[in-house]
Amino acid sequence: MIVVEVKDNEGVDKALKRFKKKVERVGILKEARQRMAYTKPTVSRKAKKLKAMHKYRILGNNG
């Protein structure tokens, strides 16, 4: 659970901004989005392979 303590004389906007940063660092939203829709293992493997091929092409041409 993420806890953000609001300091004295601190605005709600700043506290909310710190909360959002903590949520992003932990990866809660990313995990929630992944859990919303099920992807079959074959689809995820194919996407992972395509991503690796794309990365290889980019890095292969430059170095």
Image (cartoon, rainbow, N blue to C red):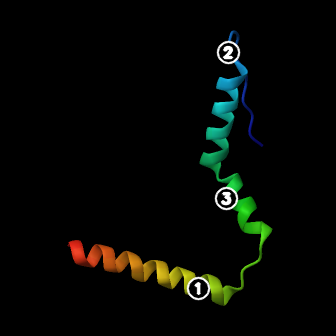
Q: Is disc 2 placed on a helix, strand or loop?
A: loop
Distance CA(mark 3)–CA(mark 1) = 18 Å
Quarter location, residue 47: bottom right
Distance CA(mark 1)–CA(mark 2) = 46 Å
**Where does residue 32 sit, x and y in percent of width and height?**
75, 60
Residue 13 horizontal side relative to residue 52, left or right = right
Q: Amino acid at mark 2?
A: Glu
Of mark 1 and mark 2, the one earlier in the sequence is: 2
Q: Which mark is residue 45?
A: 1
* Residue situated in front as seen by the camera: 3 or 40: 40
Contact? badges 3 and 2 (CB < 8 Å): no
Quarter location, residue 38: bottom right
**Where does residue 7 sit, x and y in percent of width and height?**
69, 16
Residue count near mark 3 (Cα–Cα under 10 Å), binned few <14, some 14–19, many ≥20: few
Of mark 3 and mark 2, the one earlier in the sequence is: 2
Q: Is residue 31 above or below residue 19?
A: below
User: Image quadrant for the C terminus?
Assistant: bottom left
Q: Is disc 1 placed on a helix, strand or loop?
A: helix
Q: Which mark is residue 10?
A: 2
Residue 54 horizontal side relative to residue 25, left or right = left
Q: Is residue 58 above or below residue 43?
A: above
The residue wearing badge 3 is: 30
